[in-house]
Amino acid sequence: MDIIRIDPDFTSETHSVGTSSAQSSAIVTQSGVIRIATKGCEAHVAFGTNPTATNNSILVPANSVQYFAFISGHKVAFLRSASSAGEINITAID
């Protein structure tokens, strides 16, 4: 079993995922890795200093956890691709 160390200086963010692109706050991570979990819906995600998620962005399946290489200080944009409501949780990995 791999043990993942959550960055103690970053509070995980949970957002409702809507049909329009929305953004997280800037995320600082020492490792360059973030964890994204979805609950109840699939979500498209994009990364950058001012990102906009579209239906062509990376797809994170519903009720799943994915890890991404990430540039510290950037943001995550997200939107849902289906009619089901849901949430996205974003966590910095130390």
Image (cartoon, grey):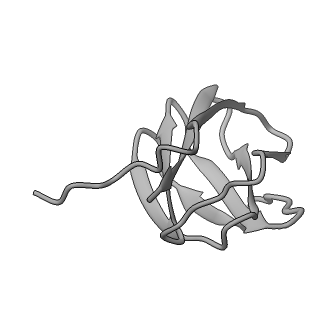
Which image quarter holds the C terminus?
A: bottom left
Left or right of residue 78: residue 62: left
Q: Is residue 86 left or right of residue 62?
A: right
Figure label count: 0
The image shows residue 9, relative to residue 4, as above or below, that is above
> What residue is at 62 percent from the left and 48 percent from the top?
43
Tell me residue 30's x, y (percent).
53, 66
User: Which residue appears at 40% of the width and 48% of the height?
Assistant: 6
Residue 18 placement, left or right of 67: right
Taking the view exactly as shown, the residue that stands out farthest to the front is: 9
Position in image of residue 29 (x %, y %) = 57, 61
Q: Is residue 45 above or below residue 80?
A: below
Q: Nearer the viewer, residue 2 or 31?
A: 31
Nearest to the observer: residue 63 or residue 11: 11
Give the vertical position of 41 relative to 61 (above or below).
above
Tell me which corner region of the image, top left, top right, bottom left or bottom right, holds residue 3.
bottom left
Residue 63, quarter of the rendered image: top left
Residue situated furthest right in the rendering: 50
Residue pushed farthest left? 1
Viewed as shown, does residue 82 lie left or right of 39? Answer: right
Residue lying at 60% horizontally and 71% vertically, measured from the top left = 70
Quarter of the figure with the N terminus: bottom left
Residue 79, how many percent across, how many down? Answer: 74, 45
